[in-house]
Amino acid sequence: MTISQGDTLPDATLVQMGDEGPAPVQMADKLKGRKVVIFAVPGAFTPTCHSAHVPSFVRTKDDFMNKGVDEIICVSCNDPFVMKAWGEATGAEAAGITMLADAASEFTKAIGMDFDAPPAGLVARSKRYAMIVDDGKVSVLQAEENPGVCETSGGEALLENL
């Protein structure tokens, strides 16, 4: 079942690169009592994700914070080493965007946002989406029909619905 507006997100363990190496992160801990933006991409360093999706949240991060968002989280079904390097390469890390690896696609599958595109080398990946989550509950969900575009799931588009 695909997650919908009004649903409560399931807990899942993702991984973030910390000072001491990869560290587990419980999604429930990130969401409890907080307003969080979560956006997901099919893959780090892939064209649309790298040139459009992450930059849209780097540009709008301060606007989200000024509207009461506590944290912006980028989720991708990559390993935490790749997510760390990608966060550095895009400026997401410097902007304060949290880069979380869903290496086993646990969270992505639990919310029904997984897909495969073997011809492109993408297997067990996340569909492109963005959501606003209030205390664990999805208040806004904007998913792309085509993983190669970033229109409704970009930072500016999501900000309009906050």
Image: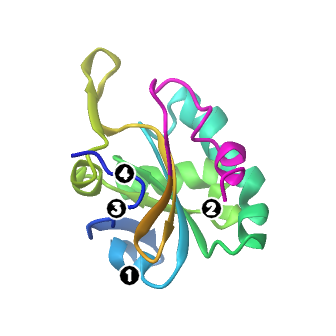
Spatial separation of the CA atoms under disc 2 and disc 1: 20 Å
Binning the other alpha carbons within 10 Å of mark 1 as few (below 14), some (14 to 19) or many (20 upward) gives some
Give the quadrant of residue 98.
bottom right
- Residues at badges 1 and 3 in contact (C-beta under 8 Å)? no
**Residue 153, placed above or below residue 137:** above
Circle 4 residue: 4
Q: Give the number of the mark in front: 3 or 2.
A: 3
The residue tagged with tag 3: helix, strand or loop?
loop
Residue at 37 percent of width and 57 percent of height:
101
Tag 2 or tag 4, which sits nearer the N-term? 4
Residue type at mark 4? Ser
- Most foreground residue, 54 or 110: 110
Circle 3 residue: 7
Tag 4 or tag 1, which sits nearer the N-term? 4
Residue at 27 percent of width and 70 percent of height:
11
Q: Position of residue 69 (x, y in %)?
A: 64, 71
Residue type at mark 3? Asp
Circle 1 residue: 29
Tag 2 or tag 3, which sits nearer the N-term? 3
The residue tagged with tag 1: helix, strand or loop?
helix
Tag 1 or tag 2, which sits nearer the N-term? 1
Give the quadrant of residue 162.
bottom right
Q: Position of residue 2 (x, y in %)?
A: 28, 45
Circle 2 residue: 93
